[in-house]
């Protein structure tokens, strides 16, 4: 049997026989993609949900032509969320760096498998090297190391699995051998993934205890300490505290140093969820904001957010890498041990792993630490301008004092009573999307609706911010 040329041409021939055709296809698709991306400022930030023509989703019996595929793709672009538009300021979704896009292309083309060294000889070494360098950036000691995972939830999961195995002394993860019910403590404003992980690691969501926060959404230390003592009295077994450096809704940072003292006093694992805020380590001016992070037993961090690396790209770092291996590794019998590199699939919650480190590496090569410092500092400059604009208007109120480039605010015009405020803010959010294309998200937080902005886009300027506030004033005048 011989395969049709049409089938073989869906691959890049390893002997170069279809190179011209492949180049043409890549060129055409790249042109179409660039037609969209280089005009992203004029495309809707978040196209309203429409039922996509399902004809494009049908699995065809026979191969589609290049023209048909490009037609399906065009609609796909037009109806997708558009974080490249500077007016898209509603979520932690950044536009990717050019080299992150190229990194995905390279990683997919090489299609190595981070499961084992023999399946990814150079990329495994790259991942080890990158995670090691991040441990240094975060100020962890030489014993530290980490792994990369597909998203922050997985990074938090692995951190808390290792915390559980280590602190409860159950290397095999058998929770039925534990005499006392284990509990962990985290802020009432920590990410929902921590609850989900309580369910996944077998302690139950009810044993993820929520600690009160102050007016700036930071963990209240005295409540933390009194809850720990209370749980011990009740016969429970506290084993970890999860602090957040950059809360999801308002970007606030828990008092890391003070929490580390309490963790040490009660012999608890300290995990710091720096999924969002970890990026400030690149800024000489702002890295002090996460002082204390170097005391963590584990840190999770997502370059896919403020480092502009395309999704997914996350990492979890451990203060004591060997201990993590000891308390987590499940050796794979079919993979032989090769020199000093442990197969990454044996020491991470994923088996087959995507080479997401490639786009992180290429982004770092192209921007350097200095480029990232400028990006982070620029975000803070925009934040300052944004807060100035909020402060000029006495009908606007901030949910907390912003510490990162996340600002959560809402209108509280004095002519309205409290019960009317949520609907006023909801209308303002829809008005901004429909009439101006500024997309801000609308989270429910502290029992009210707020407008949330994340100032990430490098093409966002002070002019955009002034323009946004002119629109908000206009809305206020008429409502
Ligand atoms: C503070 C924090 N932790 C964890 C997560 C979960 O990360 P992911 O969505 O990549 O799973 C998020 C997501 O926004 C987050 O903001």
Image: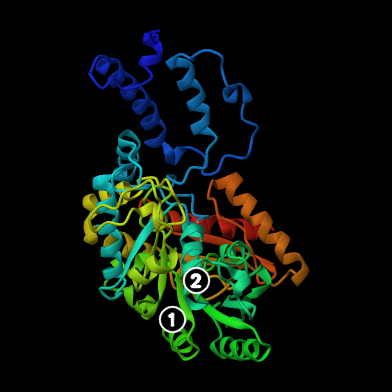
On residue 256, which mark appears? 1
Q: Quadrant of the C terminus?
A: bottom right
Q: Is residue 444 above or below residue 471?
A: below
Instruction: Give the colour scheme of this rendering.
Output: rainbow
Q: Position of residue 161 (x, y in %)?
A: 50, 66
Give the mark nearer the N terminus: 2 vs 1: 2
**Residue at 40%, 8% in the rendered image:** 1
Q: Which is nearer the eye, 184 or 121?
A: 121
On residue 239, which mark appears? none
Q: Position of residue 380 (x, y in %)?
A: 37, 66
Q: Is residue 205 above or below residue 95?
A: below
Q: Which is nearer the eye, 72 or 298?
A: 298
Q: Position of residue 138 (x, y in %)?
A: 32, 71
| Classed neighbour count for the residue bearing mark 2: other residues with Cα under 10 Å, few (<14), some (14–19), many (≥20) | many
Is 433 on the left-hand or right-hand side of 256?
Answer: right
Is 324 on the left-hand or right-hand side of 196?
Answer: left
Q: Which is nearer the eye, 309 or 262?
A: 262
**Residue at 48%, 27% in the rendered image:** 73
**Residue at 23%, 61% in the rendered image:** 369
Front position among marks 2 and 1: 2
Element at label 2: helix
The residues bearing labels 2 and 1 have C-alpha atoms spaced at a distance of 23 Å
On residue 165, which mark appears? 2
Q: Is residue 369 above or below residue 281?
A: above
Q: Position of residue 236 (x, y in %)?
A: 64, 83
| Classed neighbour count for the residue bearing mark 1: other residues with Cα under 10 Å, few (<14), some (14–19), many (≥20) | many
């Amino acid at each position: 049997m011989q395969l049709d040329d049409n089938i073989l041409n869906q691959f890049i021939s390893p002997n170069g026989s279809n190179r011209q055709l492949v180049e043409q296809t890549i060129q055409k698709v790249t042109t179409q993609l660039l037609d969209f991306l280089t005009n992203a400022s004029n495309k809707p930030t978040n196209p309203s949900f429409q039922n996509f023509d399902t004809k494009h989703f049908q699995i065809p019996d026979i191969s589609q032509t290049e023209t048909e595929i490009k037609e399906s793709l065009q609609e796909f672009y037009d109806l997708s969320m558009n974080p490249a538009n500077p007016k898209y300021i509603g979520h932690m979704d950044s536009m990717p760096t050019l080299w992150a896009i190229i990194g995905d292309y390279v990683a997919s083309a090489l299609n190595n498998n981070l499961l084992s060294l023999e399946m990814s000889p150079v990329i495994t070494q790259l991942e080890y090297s990158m995670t090691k360098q991040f441990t240094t950036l975060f100020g962890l000691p030489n014993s530290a190391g980490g792994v990369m995972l597909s998203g922050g939830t997985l990074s938090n999961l692995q951190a808390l699995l290792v915390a559980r195995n280590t602190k409860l002394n159950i290397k095999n993860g058998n929770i039925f051998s534990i005499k006392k019910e284990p509990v962990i403590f985290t802020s009432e404003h920590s990410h929902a993934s921590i609850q989900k992980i309580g369910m996944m690691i077998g302690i139950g969501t009810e044993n993820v205890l929520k600690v009160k926060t102050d007016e700036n959404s930071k963990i209240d230390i005295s409540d933390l300490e009194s809850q720990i003592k209370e749980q011990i009295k009740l016969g429970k077994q506290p084993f970890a505290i999860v602090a957040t450096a950059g809360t999801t809704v308002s970007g606030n940072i828990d008092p890391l140093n003070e929490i580390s003292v309490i963790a040490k006093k009660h012999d608890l694992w300290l995990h710091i969820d720096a999924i969002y805020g970890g990026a400030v380590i690149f800024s000489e001016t702002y890295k002090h904001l996460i002082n204390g992070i170097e005391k963590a037993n584990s840190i999770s961090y997502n370059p896919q957010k403020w480092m502009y690396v395309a999704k997914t790209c996350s990492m979890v770092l451990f203060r004591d890498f060997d201990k993590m291996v000891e308390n987590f590794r499940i050796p794979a019998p079919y993979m032989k041990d090769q020199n000093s590199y442990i197969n990454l699939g044996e020491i991470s919650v994923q088996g087959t792993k995507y080479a997401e480190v490639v786009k992180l590496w290429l982004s770092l090569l192209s921007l350097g630490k200095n480029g990232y410092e400028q990006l982070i500092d620029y975000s803070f400059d925009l934040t300052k301008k944004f807060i100035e604009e909020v402060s000029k208007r006495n009908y606007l109120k901030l949910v907390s004092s912003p510490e990162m480039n996340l600002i959560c605010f809402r209108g509280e015009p004095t002519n309205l009573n409290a019960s009317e405020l949520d609907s006023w803010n909801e209308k303002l959010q829809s008005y901004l999307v429909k009439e101006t294309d500024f997309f801000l998200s609308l989270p429910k937080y502290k029992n009210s609706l707020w407008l949330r902005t994340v100032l990430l886009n490098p093409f966002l300027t002070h002019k955009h911010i002034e323009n946004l506030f002119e629109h908000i004033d206009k809305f206020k005048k008429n409502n």
